[in-house]
Amino acid sequence: MSAEANVGVVGLAAMGASLARNLARHGNRVAVYNRHYARTEHLIDNYGDEGQFYPAKTVKEFVDLLEKPRTAIIMVKAGVATDAVIDELAEYMEPGDIIVDGGNSYFKDTIRREKELRAKGLHFVGMGVSGGEEGALLGPSMMPGGSDASWERLKPILESIAAKADDGEPCVMHVGENGAGHFVKMVHNGIEYADMQLIAESYDIMRRGLGMTPDEIGDVFEAWNGTDLDSYLIEITAEVLHKKDPQTGKPLVDVIYDHAGMKGTGTWTVQTALELGVPVTGIAEAVFARGLSDQTALREKAQADPFRGPDGHIELGVETREAFIERVRQALYASKIVAYAQGFNEISRAAETYGWDIDMAHLARIWRAGCIIRAKFLDRISEAFEDGAADVSLLFAPYFKQGIEASESDWRHVVATAAEVGLPAPVFSSSLAYFDGLRAKRLPAALIQGQRDLFGAHTYQRVDQPGAWHILWAEPDQKEVKMAD
Ligand SMILES: NC(=O)C1=CN([C@@H]2O[C@H](COP(=O)(O)OP(=O)(O)OC[C@H]3O[C@@H](n4cnc5c(N)ncnc54)[C@H](OP(=O)(O)O)[C@@H]3O)[C@@H](O)[C@H]2O)C=CC1
Ligand SMILES: O=C(CO)[C@H](O)[C@H](O)COP(=O)(O)O
């Protein structure tokens, strides 16, 4: 078997097959391998004429098909499957070869794998890929980590298949060393969760609150896509809401079981934020909202033994429906800014912690096309980082500060109304609470410190003097003592 392919793809399910086709369509000679050969056969039978493919039946055959130094991209399930494929490839690959993991791997696994493979002389690149099946085929947004040397070699290949923003810039960048690429993809997905949940909350308010039909709400989302909210997720929401069930003719959304799935990246975003000490409240509530949707027994019990409370219907009084819908749009916009701000904060903190030099303005630019969270306002986010205006938080960049201030009263009105009528809006309300927490001159955290000192002698700091202080709560005179300078 002669080495004829300049790149290879392992894992030919939705993402891998599309990526392999994208590579072949751009003039690459692509070796392809899948654990079960049926997927390889399907790719060759159906799309083999789109470019030059070299199918392999074994991992050894696949590696032998690759020109040296070799480049192999893995697109398989994250976790043990990825480890298994890496081990198989590493057995046949040689120093200087590159293994790219394009799956949604946990960034700490990527850090470990990079270290292990570096010890064998192999380059390992953890690369976030976003855009779903269609993006992988027509142009995804890609976030490779790994070494500078591997980026130099991957750059021309990846730039040729990446999505292009309106100004022609390819949506791919070298994010940083080792796990940086998978880290930012994880947070990308966390933001995706928050954005999707916000859209879902808006839908619920219009559907149950205002009694609108899916078609009517689909029209609203279509109109919103012509505003600051212009984004892929808003666009596909309109499409889903207008879709009729092929079996019954009912709105498709009404026949879909209301339990949201998740594969791990949202949960990791929140776990990691907790480890880093960064509040990502919008993302966390979005993950918990999916979790609650899937609590079958709990939800069934709540239906069988219902709690008293309002039924979700919103009485508009003198306000028109259109005016209230505009308030919902404002609430969505403000909450969405908070979700992005929190996500970028998490990336900044991780960059400090893990020693990654991440160009945040560039990162925002590569999310402008190809990826699931692509949105018009990413241009503005990029400018805000370019100017240094978003260094502390995106919320302080003038464009976003003004946007939030303009939306603020509508945001409050929507959150208050939802609470009053009994519609759950966890990301709307937690985002507003985060915003108000930032605005507060003093937080009730002082009281918590007092409580902690009382029950656990955890000490507190004073506003007027340095040091760690403690009250001798159990003693009759309850004296204050300085425990540390
Ligand atoms: N779907 C999406 O929208 C996106 C997915 N991703 C990520 O891309 C990767 C691929 O996703 P997707 O295409 O949806 O496919 P899946 O996540 O469903 O993974 C299926 C692929 O993994 C292979 N596989 C599973 N277990 C093993 C194993 N033990 N050894 C070897 N191969 C194995 C399967 O091979 P076989 O056919 O033999 O079972 C198949 O090729 C995943 O990490 C996913 O998280 C990233 C961005 C978007
Ligand atoms: O990475 C993706 C999009 O960017 C994948 O579609 C991922 O599966 C989405 O996450 P989840 O399945 O948890 O909703």
Image (cartoon, rainbow, N blue to C red):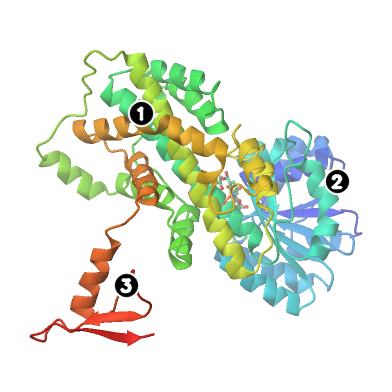
Nearest the viewer among 374 and 113 is 374
Choose top left, top right, bottom left or bottom right for residue 320.
top left
Q: Which residue is mark 3?
A: 462
Expressed as whole percent of the image width and height from the top left, the position of residue 117 reads 72, 74
Q: Which residue is mark 1?
A: 410
Q: How many marks?
A: 3
Give the residue at x 50% y 20%.
222
Q: Secondary structure at mark 3?
A: loop
Q: Earlier in the sequence, mark 2 or mark 3?
A: 2
Looking at the image, residue 226 lies above or below residue 80: above
Looking at the image, residue 303 lies above or below residue 268: above
The answer to whether marks 2 and 3 mark residues whose Cβ atoms lie closer than 8 Å is no
- Say left or right for 420 vs 40: left
Please give the label number shown on residue 28: 2
- Mark 3 close to ligand 2, CB under 8 Å: no
Q: Is residue 462 visible?
A: yes
Q: Is residue 105 visible?
A: no
Give the residue at x 54% y 23%.
227
Choose top left, top right, bottom left or bottom right for residue 138.
top right
- Say left or right for 169 vs 390: right
* Mark 2 and mark 3: Cα distance apart in space: 65 Å
Give the residue at x 90% y 54%.
4
Q: Amino acid at mark 3?
A: Arg
The answer to whether marks 3 and 1 mark residues whose Cβ atoms lie closer than 8 Å is no
Mark nearer the viewer, 2 or 3: 3
Q: Residues within 10 Å of mark 1 (few under 14, many from 20)?
A: many
Mark nearer the viewer, 3 or 1: 3
